[in-house]
Amino acid sequence: MTRQSISLTKKNDEWLKNQLAEEEFNSKSEAINYLIKQARNQKEYYAFVRMKIERGEKSGFSNKTKEELLAEIKSNLK
């Protein structure tokens, strides 16, 4: 692992200290790495959702009824 030196706001430093005191993390480094991983995962999830929305928008509107759509979805699950 590479070493980094970072500056934290007072509130963020207090939050980190509380996490260590509550034994949520073993070190500040562990907490920071966890938060960075969460941010990366969130970015990937948002990209996935955006792609699904764009695909849905490009497919156009449906004239099917709610019941027809539900039946189609159920048949695709089999």
Image (cartoon, helix red, strand yellow):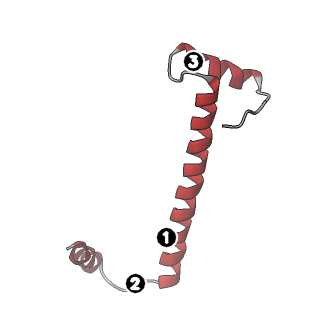
Q: Earlier in the sequence, mark 1 or mark 3?
A: 3
Crowdedness near tag 3: few (<14), some (14–19) or many (≥20) residues, C-alpha within 10 Å: some
- Within 10 Å of disc 1 (Cα), the crowding (few <14, some 14-19, many 20+) is few
Does residue 76 appear left or right of residue 27 in this picture? Answer: left
**Label 1 amino acid?**
Lys
Tag 3: amino acid: Leu
The residue that label 3 is drawn on is 20
- Up the image or down, 2 lies above or below 46; here it is above
> Is 19 in front, or is 3?
3
Per the image, label 2 sits on a secondary structure element best described as loop
Task: Tell me what residue is drawn at x 63 percent, y 33 percent.
Answer: 32
- Picture quadrant of residue 3: top right
Query: What residue is disc 1 on?
Result: 52
Q: Is residue 15 above or below residue 45?
A: above
Residue at image location 70% in from the left, 21% down from the top? 13
Please state which of residues 69 and 76 is positioned toward the viewer in this rendering.
76
Nearer-N-terminus badge (3/2): 3
The residues bearing labels 1 and 3 have C-alpha atoms spaced at a distance of 39 Å
